[in-house]
Image (tube, grey):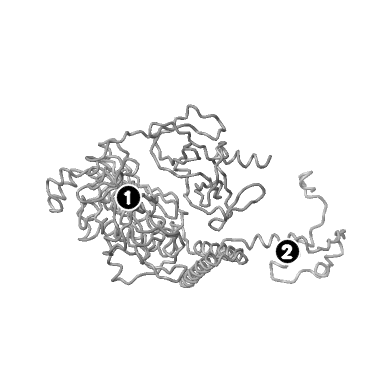
Amino acid sequence: DSLKKSGQEGNVDYSILINTLVSLEKGELPPEQFANDKPYEECTEIDVPEAEVDSGNTIPDIIKNQSKKDESPESANIRVNVELLDSLMNLVGEVVLARNQFSRIINESNDSSILGTSQSLSRVATGLQETVMKARMQPIKNVWGKLPRMVRDLSMNCGNKIRLEMEGQESGLDKSLITAIQDPLMNIIRNSIIHGIETPEERREIGKPEEGVIQLRAKNQNGQIHIEVQDDGRGINFEEARSQAVNDKRITREQGESLSDRDCGKLLFMKGFSLTRHSLMKPTKGNGLSDTRALIEKIGGALDIEVHPEISTTLKIKIPLTLAIIPALIVSNGPNRFAIPQVNIKELIWLEEGQLLNQIEEITGSQFYRLRGNLLPLVHLNNILGIEPVEDRPDLNIVVLQADECQIGLVVEQIHNTEEVVVKSLENLVKDLNVFSGATILGDGKIVLILDVMGLTKSAMIISDKNSKSELIESVSKSQADDEAEESMLIVNLGNDHKMAIRLADVARLEELSRSDIELSGDVQVIQYRDEIMSLINIPEQFNKPFQVPEKIKVVVYIHEGKSIGLIVENILDIVQSAIDKKRQIKGSSLMGTIITNNSVVDTIHVENLIKKFFTSRKD
């Protein structure tokens, strides 16, 4: 303090301290008088408040702080053997199978006393299944980690400047698929570098930045992971592709001249086809996008290409999140039952006898169904499997399937219910048929085969390209107005021939339920539906069109805030394409506008507003 105030050291005697430091420096003991000092005699005693005794209802701060320290990433994660996860998934599959069998027994016995137990078991099994599947999920960034270096090295070899941009790295994928997707993904990016992006000199000449960009995007959607690889290069030279295919005698010159631009892109998926510009990077025979597509299809995925010449090329991959347990629709032909993965199903169609002549057409020996103005190719499951039909049915059941970029209609004799099925692998001999992707055991203990939708399409020799298919159909179908405002609308009847429309985008499912299963929760009708309690709204009553509810009720299922809401209608009539005229729309109204169908004006229901008004009125 003296040095701070006056700039001088003051009169304090530091000789003892100095002698002590000198002694210590020489390795000697300090002077005796300093060594014998009692350092604690000058300490000041202070009062410490008595600690409160914890009653057990609170956690001391020291423990809370310790808990926070323990919540580090290292302590929150543990390593688990993959074989253990595989074993756990197999056990979960057996639990799901037992649940399906138990549910079937309960439904057949109509024993309400154990219905609650059955529902609890179903919820627990579903939760267990989802948890184990999450445990098997890994972020796709585990595959992407090697890509930046590969892009850098390969672009240098090709004399290019390329930047890799990645989006959606946290998207999850099953552990077994993470490994399977690695090679196809690297091959796709390699093709983008070799075939797609120009050299810096070429990019300067056409006004592009010297540095090319490859964008890698991933997202989880509808039980699938969607991966897109897009480059901003020149894309495919369609004329060069046609010429190369003709020179390789893959197609005739006449076929090459009539080949659409989209079909030219599909040529890259042919075995051994290549447009390589860099001789040092020329792939070996058999490599390329053909093998890449085969690998992706082997795990139940699909690969498609979209080309915009001189602008970009995009390769799109769709892969199911898991191959272990999937929801499937059960269909049958005679005594034989089959399962169709629900992810490939777009819609179900039932045609009565009177509709067959008007809506089924034959073109060059093949049957087509006129679906909302377009022709849908029909494939009879009996014909593909070589099964004789049991009986001639006056009606027709069609399952509309999405196979890659192509839609087909699979004709089956009967459509049953949906089940979560455990996928069992098949022997290679059966796999080579390209019709079945696996097998499963249903709730009644019967073994059924799972249909391979992609394989069915190929077996039926359907062109997997909607544009080329439309060229075939164009000559026999009427032209359709190109109005982007048009959308699919579900036409329903509220009674007394009073029709209304619901946007098909608002429809999750269409169901036929039993009136006897309806219960009351307060003043709201509810029904047990798919492991949840679904509220029901009588749509005719909401528009002052009451009708006598039949024993079998038609229900349009809508998803509101993550929960199913059932909209009761008298009948479901049709699906049409129409633009909504919103000029008469009133804010907050249960109507969003009108459409014109069959020369009649039909009101369109604003489902979200109607549901909000319904529950608001119940609260009041």
The one nearer the camera, 309 or 511, is 511
Image location of residue 586, percent across then percent down: 54, 29
Q: How many marks?
A: 2
The one nearer the camera, 304 or 347, is 347
Q: Amino acid at mark 2?
A: Leu
Give the residue pinned by disc 1: 407
The one nearer the camera, 15 or 182, is 182
Which circle, 2 or 1, is nearer the viewer?
A: 1
Q: Residue at x 30, y 67 (%)?
A: 431
Q: Which residue, as the protein is rendered here, is positioned at the far top? A: 583
Residue 152 seen in the figure: no
Residue 574, compared with residue 122, is above or below; it is: above
Answer left or right for 351 relative to 102.
left
Answer left or right for 49 relative to 611.
right
Q: Amino acid at mark 1?
A: Gln
Image location of residue 20, percent across then percent down: 75, 65
Image location of residue 31, percent across then percent down: 79, 69
Secondary structure state at the residue bearing disc 2: helix
User: Whole-Å distance between the Cαs marked 2 and 1?
Assistant: 93 Å
How crowded pointer 1 is (Cα within 10 Å; few <14, some 14-19, many 20+) is rated as: many
Q: Disc 2 or 1, which lies upstream in sequence?
A: 2
Do tag 2 and tag 1 residues touch (Cβ < 8 Å)? Answer: no
Q: Quadrant of residue 175?
A: bottom left
The one nearer the camera, 362 or 451, is 362
Quadrant for the C terminus in the image:
top right
Q: Quadrant of residue 150?
A: bottom left
Give the residue pinned by disc 2: 21
